[in-house]
Image (cartoon, rainbow, N blue to C red):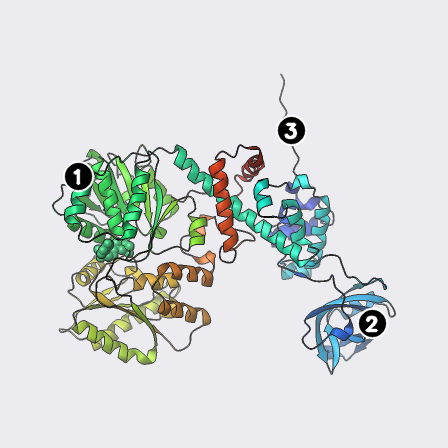
Amino acid sequence: MSERIIISSSPDILSNPIDYLKGVGPLRAELLKKELGIFTFRQLLEHFPYRHIDKTKVSLIRDITPETDYIQVAGKLMSLEIMGAHKGKRMVAELKDSSGVLELVWFQGISWVEKKLRLGDHYLVYGKAGFYQQMPQITHPEIEDFTPGSTDGKNFLEPVYPCTEKLKARGLGARQIANLTHTLLTLIREKDFPENIPDTIVKNLSLTSRYRAIHDIHFPSTQDAYEKALSRLKFEEFFIAQVRLGLIRSQRHRFSKGVIFKQVGELFNRFYNENLPFELTGAQKRVLKEIRKDCGSGKQMNRLLQGDVGSGKTIVALLTMLLAVDNGYQSCLMAPTEILARQHFTNITKLLEGLPITIRLLTGSTRSAARRIALEELQAGMLHIIIGTHALIEKPVQFNNLGLAIVDEQHRFGVAQRAKLWEKAVINPHMLVMTATPIPRTLAMTAYGDLDTSIMDELPPGRKPIITVHRTEMYRPKVMDFMKDEISKGRQVYIIFPLIEESQKMDYENLMKGYENVKAYFPEPKYHMSMVHGKQRQQVRETNMQRFIEGDTQIMVATTVIEVGVDVPNASVMVIESAERFGLSQLHQLRGRVGRGSEKSYCILLTGNKLNNEAGERLKTMSATNDGFLIAEKDLSIRGPGDIEGTRQSGMLNFKLASIVLDRALLESAKENAEQLIEKDPELNTEESIRLKQFLHGQQGKTVWRKIS
Ligand code: ADP
Ligand code: MG
């Protein structure tokens, strides 16, 4: 019997356990693993410095001025004296160079330092300079032996690494980490860290080579070299991610099978000509064209529809569903809440009046008899359109021939939930994913980069811009008067209270108090109020919402449960209480509840007197613009990508060095280059792409790259 022994083709030094590195004993290995998560050579290499200090230059003591920050000087140790006692105990040394004298002071570790120093010897000293009684001074300097005569410091910038207190206490500070990294770099050859970006791109963009970059990011000889290394590695992070996403898209475009919606049929045309109550905006028409092209291509559509609040995504969804019906396929529209699902159902049913289309609603609270009928009709193919909530993705929901699945307000749904819709048909249905508010471009490019994107950046005509103002508590009576005026003109008003989980109890009390206050000001029977919040029974909530929608009540006091999608065109005032506690996109989304009719609308942001900078910034942004795309960008730049709703779990934003906020230009360039490459060479089979392909294979499994939709 012969057994084949498989020898791995190239032993990968970077996978070595960190314990194998010279200078790392069992104790240090343990610390590195526990404190910094460094288990391998590679992880040490990828533990990047967060800054460098310039020790290439040795200054003269004379040059120290009150403006001097950190400085490096060299000189001879002239005196060493321990003074004071107890808490006042300190050691003071004098260092002299050709230009003057500098005092060095220690309050701690005195005996240890004292042992190291010898009068008359030369030292290289580094630290933050200050003055004490007109004398230049450095407290707790870094100090090392120096050979007089050499005028230079070191020939590289010294890296400073992220480090923990525990590590420092155990003698494994930034300095020691630098030494270990230095040792490691001497072991790494170019073959261990080979180029992965195609040559043409490296050349066109004048990128530092990958091998050079990993050296220079730790030990650059100049600031410029550091920046080039950093930029190269950031570009690589973006580029690799963009190639992965691009490959997913490209493979879908080329291989995924999709049902074909061949023609615009009778129903679509009849609806368009007879039922559509308005002219479509240019953006709506353009997006429909994009969708039709996808659905007719024979490949599965996977499209993200981004449109600002109120841009009219619903009608686009409806027309797409009609396209499906015309071609003999069923569609579903999934919304994140019961209220929204019901609203879609009501609106769409009304819009479809007179057309031979069967449509039903399915939510968690659909009664069992109605549910049974819906499910039967669905399976028998008698139902054309089904609208609902999560209930749609449950097991018993079986379609006859699902051709199109639309998900509204997508970031409330998890990835996995959307994927379940796919399984409901033999051939994957076309997917249209609609966002509640715009996503910043850079985020769309990364977190949703595997989807094709349509953008609706135009509001229906006749909308008056919403006037947004920020008012402090003092103005509350005036705000109330203003509401009264508007209501007397026949308009409706929203008042929103924050309800955020950690402080729910207090928030709940505030909401109740707020409700009573408003009620005192707007007494029955002249005025009627609705209240909607998450603690109510579903049915109560629905009824209250419905009364407001029908104009039965003039004032809606609510928490953010009404945030998304609700459409009451007659409402013209949105008052947001404790507005400083809301995020930007949430504020924008809330504001989008008004300004839906032709009346002039207002958004009033109420806050206390004291605001932190970030909140102030948010409110200023809200007052300055109605443009959701602009606001999304601002939101991202204030909060950073980590917090943006719905992206945390995506696993696509975990860049080590690059930031989608700060390195936008690099991201754009990475995307462009990745796309060009995939267009030219979709299998990455040409000679110059092969190492990229190998790199991607090697990485597989290390990062989770899930499909988003
Ligand atoms: P969103 O994109 O926020 O989901 P909706 O689809 O709810 O927006 O549309 C907002 C409002 O604008 C609705 O009342 C809708 O009837 C109306 N609307 C949509 N498209 C147009 C249009 N082309 N012209 C006029 N009104 C429109
Ligand atoms: Mg909507």
Camera-side mark, 2 or 3: 2
Q: Position of residue 657 (x, y in %)?
A: 56, 53
User: Residue type at mark 2?
Assistant: Asp
Q: Residues within 10 Å of mark 1 (few under 14, many from 20)?
A: some
Identify the disc placed on residue 551: none
Res. 368 in view: no
Closer to us: 406 or 32: 406
Quadrant location of the C terminus in the rendered image: top left
Q: Position of residue 423 (x, y in %)?
A: 33, 37
Residue identified by numbered label 3: 7
Report helix, strand or loop for mark 3: loop
Q: Residues within 10 Å of mark 2 (few under 14, many from 20)?
A: some
User: Residue type at mark 1?
Assistant: Glu
Tell which residue pokes out farthest to the front in this image: 204
**Spatial distance from mark 1 to mark 2, Cα to Cα?**
93 Å
User: Residue type at mark 3?
Assistant: Ile
Q: Is mark 2 within 8 Å of ligand 1?
A: no
Residue at point 18%, 37% (across, down): 377
Q: Position of residue 300 (x, y in %)?
A: 34, 37
Report helix, strand or loop for mark 1: helix
Camera-side mark, 3 or 1: 1
Residue identified by numbered label 2: 97
Query: Which comes before the other along the chain, label 1 or label 2?
Result: 2
Q: Are marks 3 and 1 in contact (CB under 8 Å)?
A: no
Tell which residue pokes out farthest to the top in this image: 1
Identify the disc placed on residue 266: 1
Left or right: 416 in relation to 336: right
